[in-house]
Each structure stands twice: as C-alpha cells, then as structure tokens.
Amino acid sequence: MHGTIYALLLSLLFSMVARADSTADFMVAARQAHGALGERAAAFLVEHMPAADRAQLSADFLLENLELALKARETFPWAKAVPEEIFFNDVLPYAVLDETREAWRADYLETASAIVRDAKTATEAAQLLNRDFFDAINVHYSRKRKRPNQSPNESAELGKASCTGLSIILVDACRAVGIPARVAGTPLWTNKRGNHTWVEIRDGDWHFMGADEYNAEGVDRGWFVGAASKAQADSFAHAIYATSWKKTDLYFPMVWAQHDHSVPGLNVTDRYASPSEKNAHELGVRLFDEQGERIMAEGALISPEGSVLATFETRGNRADLNDVPRIKVEPGKTYRLRFGDRQTAPFVAEPGISTLDVKRAELEWINDRKDAKMQGKHDSKSSDLRVFAVNNTASQELVQKLFNELVEASRAERQAELEQQEIAFDGKTLRWLEKTYGEAPADGRSLWISMHGGGGAPTALNDKQWKNQINLYQPAEGIYIAPRAPTDTWNLWQQSHIDHLFARLIENHVALRGVNPNKVYLMGYSAGGDGVWQLAPRMADRFAAASMMAGHPGDMSLLGLYNLPFAIYMGGNDSAYKRNLHAAEKGQALDELQRQNPEGYIHRVRIYEGLGHWMQHNDREAVPWMAGFARNPWPKKIVWVQDNILHDRFYWLKIPENAAVKGAKIVAEVDGQILRLEGDVPNGTRVRLSEQLLDLDQPVRLSVNGTEVFNGPVNRDRAVMEASLRERLDPAAAAPAEIVVEF
C-alpha cells in the first residue's frame, strides 16, 4: 500500500517537473523560431501565467499560440501598429478569464480573417466580427448555458453562452486577427440588477461594445451605457473592471468564482462614469410569460390620463438578462405600462435608473375591457386599445422571424442530433436509419416515420426487425426514417418517452432538413403497428396520415382520428391476439364514425384474405395513399380525447399544465366567427386563433358548454406567436392570437 502511494507521489513529482520544463522549452523554441521578439513575447507570457497553467500547458500549445499571434501581427495592418507592450498583454494571451484552456486561435484566425478581409481599421474589423462571427459559429446568448465562463469550444457545442461566454468569444476572435481586446464588466450594477460583462478593443484608445450586440452606429454604444454611467470607482461591487494578462495590484472579480483572484484587473470606471442628462432618469422593462421566460412584445408608457408618452419593444429570451428597453421618466410621477389589451397597475417612477419586471399573467385588462368583450361593447376601431395590433401580413412575417430565431438558438444542438442520428430524453435514446427519395418539392420534403416490430425479445432480434424496416417501404419522395425503439419491452412504441422523442425528431427535420410540417407520415408493422394504433390518435395534430400494419389496437380510442386519414392493413389469417378480428371491428367502427361525421374519419381498411402476419408486401399500397394527404393544422373541428399518455396541446387548443386527465374529452368547432367548446374544458384553456380558422379583423364569440365566455375583437399578439413556437417548433401551427377561457 505504501509502495503504491510512493509511486503515485513520484509520478506527480515527475509530471510537475515536466511541466516546469515545458515553459523553458517553450521560451527556447520561441527564441529559435522568432528571434528576440519571440523571446520577449514568450518571457512575458510565462512571467504572468497563472500557476495552474504553468503546471498543465505544454510547450507545443504555447508555441502554436505565440506563432499564430505573431502571424496575425504580420498579416493585418492594424496589428503592425500596436505597441509591443499592448500586443503582449492584449493580443498574445491564450485565455481571457478562468475558462478551460484550449487551442482556439487557428480556427478563429481562419473564420475571422474571412470576415475582416475588407476592413481598414481595427475598429471596423471589430465591428464586423461582432456582427458576423457569432452567426458563423452558431453561438448566441441563452440563460440555459451550462456555466457562465464557458470556453469557446464549450459554447460552440451548446450553441449557447452567457454574456461572459460571448465576451470571451469576441475577445478571442479579435485577438486572432491582431486586435487588442479584453473583457470588461461590473460585479453589480448600482441599481442592484446583477452583474454584466462586455468587451473593450483598442484602436488608438480603448472602446467598448456588447458581445453579439452589434450596433450599426459604431462602438461605445450599448444598452448598458446608462447603467455604466452610474458606476462607482471607489466601490468594489459597483466599479467597472477590465482584464489584464500582466499582473496588477487588482484582480478582475469573477462572480461565478468569487474567491479566485488569479485574473489581474484594472479599474476603468472613470471611462464610463460620466452621467449625462438623457441617462439621468430611465426605466427599463422586462416582460415575462407564465413559465418565467422573457418575451418580446410592443409596449407603451402611459400617463395617468391614458396618453401614450413613449413606445418600446421588450427583448426575447435570447437577449442578455440585463438587456432591456429604457424609457425616459420623471421621478415621482405616476405611470402605467400597456401591452396590447392589458396594462400594469399604476407605479411611481424612481430617481436614477431602475428596471421594472412585469409578469404577463398579472396585467390588468384596460378599462374592464374583459367585461366589455364579453358583452360585445368594445369599439374595435379604438386607436388607444388597438394601436399595437399587428396586421395579417406582418404577423406572418413575424412568425417566420421568430421561427428563424428559435432555430438559430438551438441549431448546434439539433444539428448534432441529426448528424449522430440520436436523440436522448429522460434516460432513453432514439436512434434511426434513414433514406432519402426523390427531388425536394418547392413546398418542402415529406417525412416518413416507420416503426419496426419485435418487442419483448432480445436486443439482437429487435435490431434485426429494425434493420428490416428501413427496406420495407419506399415513398416516391421524402426522407424515410426507421427509428430504433429505445427499449426492448413488449410495448416498444407505447411508452411516454416516444411522444417526446418523435416530436423532437419531427421538429429537427422541419428546422434543419427542409421538411414541410404538413407532410409528416406515421406507419408501423407488428409491434410498430401497435404503436400506430396508440400514437396516431393522441398525436393526430402532428401527422398528415397514418397507416397501421398487423398491429393490435389495445384500448385506444378512435375519436381523436377525426382529422387524420387512417389506414388499417391486416392479414385475414393473422389470428394471434385476435389481431384480424380487432382490425375488422375497428374498420367497422370507423365506417360508423364517418357516417355520422361525413367530413371526418377518412379511412381505408384492407384485410388480405388467406394471408397471415406477413402480407407479402401488399401493404405497400399504403404509401401512395398516404402521400395524397397533407395535414391541416387549423381544422374547423377537433375531437381531443386524453388516453394514458397525457398531452396539453392538440391542434389549436392548449390546456394548463397538469390539467390533463385520462379519458377527458373536448370537442371544439368553428362556425364563421363563433367558436364552441364542449366537454371537459379546464379553466385557463387557451384557444389559439389564426386567419385559417376565422377572420381576426372581425369580432369573435366563444362559448364553453353553452355559456358565452367571450364576445369581442382579438389582437394579433407577438407574445402568443412566440409562446406557441416555443411549445412546438412548427411555423404552420403557430398562432398569432388567442383567447383564454376564464370562468
């Protein structure tokens, strides 16, 4: 035992010596390759290197970083003019803060060079990088990043970063092309609204910019200027600091590692703390939805008399938490904020700069408009109440814009799932095989999800069934996918994780593979057919058509198939578990449902007499039949029945979280401008509306179980569009307006 410990200690000692030797080797190599300049640069880098880096970084790592920095100095005209001391301190370093050390410089030099090739000055180059570099690497702001001080590669893997992570990326991108750059920030704004980090670049003097917050007007501009002007140089918490590689008497405060003083800092507050009259008294606004997510919306500052004093637009969830619109106010005066049909309670403006957090659910109706709507007394042409309404064309453009933003925010994660052909959820992983057929139509490709049989069998047997499934059917056009069930249990495709995994699979292909969300088809054989029986009714709003081959229906309800063309294919002799008898019974039930509802329950039943479980490929006739249908995301009638796997959204209905109950049924219909909901309708149900459903420029009436609960105009609302897209990345089903059922 003691011998083992001794050996470990000896190994550690040798490692430390080797690392110490690596810095010496680095300085020798730098002198040999780059002469006196290389020697001075290497000596500076090593002298001020954090102790942890000295113990772990190799000579090769350090030498590559130095050589690429010197290459940038020779390549770019602005870099040649940088004084040596500043070049060593603010271009040469391989790190900014305490982020994971990695060799970013070669890739960043290549990407950044293409962006700044036409730039004439360091400022112009830095502006171009701030505008284009984050799109080039697909990284943008998100509160859902893993940690604030992510390295460039860590942020790129997620496609998300904090203000600090974005600042590290922009500093590195600038340094890659020879622009002196450093991080600046404050531990705490004077209004106690949190910390923030941004970037400073040097072009004759130091200038600042928000990372991934390009401003076409130039540098030294940003949403945080007003707050920065209130910084206090003599207050540790409220001062503004910049990073330095060279050791100083101060350290840069890292709020995520408050006891780490390893990053040297400079107090640069005086460059920011110059209050101006226009920034003296400002109100910032953040708007949150019911899930606590920030939402974009047009708003107005309202006087006590109801006059519009100023308009603004709140930021969405992709913006930095401290990035807020700011409105000039007079301290001591009373105001309200208005968003569409609702407004805040009166509040008194505070002196200085403050931020008001508004929860959408707590907004009040304007002048009891809720009651006026119910009684049909509201004047739909009232400019005060409809000044921020969006017309139909603008709402369609806005939906596409929001969709594109959400795609970009999740692109890296979704792209990785598609490339690896794996999606993980709740401890389960969905893998798939795929083939692509035909040319892509102008309106987008079709997507075919085809589930294999097996179940309750060894993995090898289920794998064989899976690999067979990819060759069973061939659409004339489309991406044909054979997913591998995440488990080997008898109920392969009937478990709750399947719904989520298929939803993600569809969204990924819509977002990144050009799939038309109205042309998604579901099919399955044997145990895969069991899955079709279960999934099709409860996810009918996702599919254009579905076909069941040789499966057992279990206890499923056919009612949810009202808008989903559904086919049954079965061998007449497939008597195991009475599959053939159940297929015939369900076919007859669908006949009766369609007789009672001529516009719904389109179906086809094929029972091949004399054939058993294997139908000798006769069931392939399902493919052209299915391809003849496209989903209608806005049907005039929907029938929603909850089974044992519960859902909170179905077509244009959205019920509150945890309100779903097994067996609950809602029938919703549209007749002109009248909506009727019958059945188990929870309080708080959201009735989503669109131009495909009714005329949003005319008053709308809504009744629930015979009682009118709404009568009046509705506004197209950016927040509703964003919420429906966040729930489901499906632009065809995104709603521009909604009515909330309130009993």
Image (cartoon, helix red, strand yellow):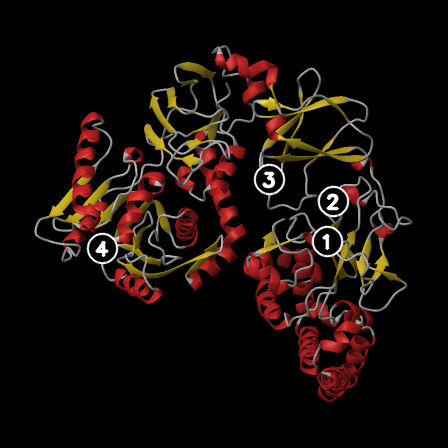
**Residue occupied by mark 2:** 224
Three-letter amino acid code at the position of disc 2 = Phe
Residue 230, quarter of picture: top right
Three-letter amino acid code at the position of disc 1 = Trp
- Residue 293, numbered circle: 3
**Residue occupied by mark 1:** 198
| Eye-nearest disc, 2 or 4 | 4
Dot 2 or dot 3: first in sequence order is 2
Residue 386, quarter of picture: top right
Is disc 4 placed on a helix, strand or loop? loop
Q: Does 422 appear above or below 27?
A: above
**Residue at the spot x=76%, y=41% of the render?**
193
| Eye-nearest disc, 3 or 1 | 3
Quadrant of the frame with the N terminus: bottom right
- Residue 476, numbered circle: 4
Is disc 2 placed on a helix, strand or loop? loop
Is disc 1 placed on a helix, strand or loop? strand
Query: Residue 489, image x and y in percent?
Result: 36, 56
**Residue at the spot x=59%, y=28% of the render?**
361
- Residue 668, numbered circle: none
Dot 3 or dot 1: first in sequence order is 1
Q: Does 581 appear above or below 261?
A: above
